[in-house]
Image (spheres, rainbow, N blue to C red):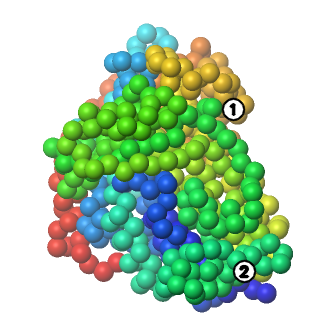
Amino acid sequence: MSIRSVAVAGSGPMVWIAASALRRAFQHLQLDVCVVDTGATRDARIGRWTLPSQRGIHGLLGIAEPHFVQQTGASFKLASEHVGWQGEGSRFLHAHGEIGVDIGGTPFYKFLQRETLAGRAERPESFSLAAAAASLGRFARPAGDGKSLASSFTYGFHLEDVPFTQYLQAHARRLGVREAAAPLAEVELDEAGAIRALRLADGGVLQADYFVDCSGPEARLLNALGPAARDDWSDWLPCDRMWSALAPAISHPPAVTRIVAGESGWSWRAPLANASMAGYVYSSRFASDDAARATLQRREPSCSPSLLTHFSAGRRRQFWWRNCVGLGAAAVELEPLVGADLHLAQIGLALFIELFPLRRSSDVEAAEYNRLMAENADALRDFTLAHYRAGAPRAGEFWAMTRASAPPARLAEKLELYGASGRINLLDHETFEETDWAWILMGAGCMPATLELQILLRLAKLPAQQVNALRAQIQQLAASMPPHIEFVRRQAGPAAGGAH
């Protein structure tokens, strides 16, 4: 039997992204897509920051960025600033862009490593247009042909969840996505153990050929299929709670998410067009909910009433089970440090579309999907954990725990190879690229014992005046950009409200 209908269950942004993407991808099949509300989930939050890949999914869904920014109050994100992660006084940026320009096929960050090893340390921020603009509180979209400095960066977004979800819901309706008349009450299984239908709170029944579970950590559809094996990452990543809240607007805000290490976790602050968001991510093993909330209120005394989010680091071993696919926290739970929750869910969505079954019996497709998603999830876990493992350890019981267990083998091998020769070895299905790892490792103060011989030979040919000219050009380009908040407010003008 061919697939003619899909039910998508959930309540946050991802449910509408999934429904819209399925509707657009299979419009030639007239695929019926219906969203079923599952109510509030324990991972609900005030807002989020995203990776640049969010721009790509918006483009695929037919969302015009100026209209999106105007309607949601979003702001842009060029970088994350990490404060205190290697002890008091430490600070580094992870920018969404290149570091310098390639030197005969050699990444420019290798030059910075060589200089540091020679006692002539320079910060990567001096050679990144994204970082320079972020530090100056400026922003502009990339420009040029892909080979120029003006196109050497990209950006993500800062988003408040309620207007973001409402915007996506309205967009999905325009695409022809249907909505169930009532929320989900229970899941009905057939004699083979697959999902037959969803029973709604008003007594109605929604039948579909396939089901997508975007219902958060509760995973109401997947859990109805039976107990599931899960990999627990909490010994490596003990943070399991977050208080978040809206706060007043920041004066002249940079396009930056600021992340500050604390006693039992880390706090964050991100700008919006007319407000800001703040939060405290922590481990309940080291701080009570009341104490953590007091920490947030002490750091951000002007915050509105806050929202408590629960999560438990880990992933399912089967993301696609029978006729149901889990996306987002229904499949993988991870603290929001690197802003990749939507990104990972959208990888899962894209892969489901790529492997979309021709019929309900889809064991072969499911096996491949589960293999690829496991690799993607584990790679994201490793990059998140690297923030805690890189550089000098921060003092405190919480921070000691993040280094108490041996790291995952793939991360340990990556860090050992880097420490020996500066080589960053990327495995298959990694979200973050070589330059992203360089930002984190160098920013944290990790330097290799030496560099590979052929790298040293290439770097010996780089003239000093070329480096000085590059630094000056980057600063000049960054200074020519408008202030970030001015650019955001331009999107809210009359010209931004057109069709999308």
Instruction: Give the residue pinned by disc 2.
Output: 196
Mark 2 secondary-structure assignment: strand
In the picture shown, does residue 371 fall above or below 475? below
Q: Nearer the viewer, residue 350 or 229?
A: 229
Please state the horizontal and vertical placement of residue 107, each as a whole percent of the image. Answer: 52, 34
Quarter containing the N terminus: bottom right
Please state the horizontal and vertical placement of residue 170, each as a whole percent of the image. Answer: 38, 78
Give the left or right position of residue 400, taking residue 228 as reference: left
Tell me the crowding category of disc 1: few under 14, some 14 to 19, or many 20 or more residues within 10 angstroms, Cα based: some
Q: Which amino acid does the dot numbered 2 rest on?
A: Arg
- Count numbered badges in the picture: 2
Give the left or right position of residue 440, taking residue 363 as reference: left
Tell me the crowding category of disc 2: few under 14, some 14 to 19, or many 20 or more residues within 10 angstroms, Cα based: many
In the picture shown, does residue 187 fall above or below 80? below
Disc marking residue 408: 1
Asked whether residue 201 appears in the rendered view, the answer is yes
At a point 78% along the width and 79% down the height, the residue shown is 190
Q: Quick one: label 2 or label 1, which is nearer the N terminus?
A: 2
Mark 1 secondary-structure assignment: loop
At a point 57% along the width and 24% down the height, the residue shown is 401
At a point 50% along the width and 65% down the height, the residue shown is 14
Q: Nearer the viewer, mark 2 or mark 1?
A: 2
Q: Which amino acid does the dot numbered 1 rest on?
A: Pro
Q: Nearer the viewer, residue 189 or 101?
A: 189
Please state the horizontal and vertical placement of residue 224, each as a whole percent of the image. Answer: 69, 66
Q: In which quarter of the view is residue 426 placed? A: top right
Q: Nearer the viewer, residue 429 or 6?
A: 6
Q: In which quarter of the view is residue 360 placed? A: bottom right
Query: How far apart are the two marked residues, 2 and 1, measured between alpha carbons?
Result: 39 Å
Asked whether residue 328 appears in the rendered view, the answer is no
At a point 37% along the width and 37% down the height, the residue shown is 290
